Amino acid sequence: MIKNKFVAFGLFIFFVIVICNLLDYLYATMISHSTYQFMAGQDFFVPLAVGVVVGYFMFIRDKK
């Protein structure tokens, strides 16, 4: 378990972005049989925003 909550927060955001892009890639290639196109807004900033919000409530916020 990671003791520093900010390192855990950063790793969580990184893995949210990676997993979202991996799932998008798998959907594009396996299910819809189209080419994968990385778009900064949809494939980076949306998972980043979701990761920051969820990660804040999971790691940064003080638990009472």
Image (cartoon, rainbow, N blue to C red):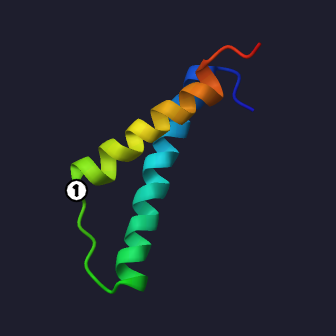
Quadrant in the picture for residue 25: bottom left
Write the residue at 55% across / 35% down.
54
Q: Nearer the viewer, residue 17 or 42?
A: 42
In the picture, which quadrant includes the N terminus?
top right
- Percent x, y for residue 51? 48, 38
Q: Is residue 34 above or below residue 56?
A: below
Write the residue at 28% across / 72% down.
36
Quadrant in the picture for residue 60: top right
Quadrant in the picture for residue 27: bottom left
- Percent x, y for residue 59? 63, 25
Total number of numbered discs in the rendering: 1
Q: Circle 1 sits on which residue?
A: 39
Q: Is residue 10 above or below residue 44?
A: above
In the picture, which quadrant includes the C terminus?
top right
Write the residue at 32% across / 53% down.
43
Quick check: 36 left or right of 19? left
Quick check: 4 left or right of 19? right
- Percent x, y for residue 53? 49, 31
Quick check: 1 left or right of 48? right
Please state which amino acid type lies under the numbered disc 1: Met
Under circle 1, the secondary element is loop
- Percent x, y for residue 3? 71, 22
**Mark 1 crowdedness (10 Å alpha carbons): few <14, some 14-19, many ≥20:** few
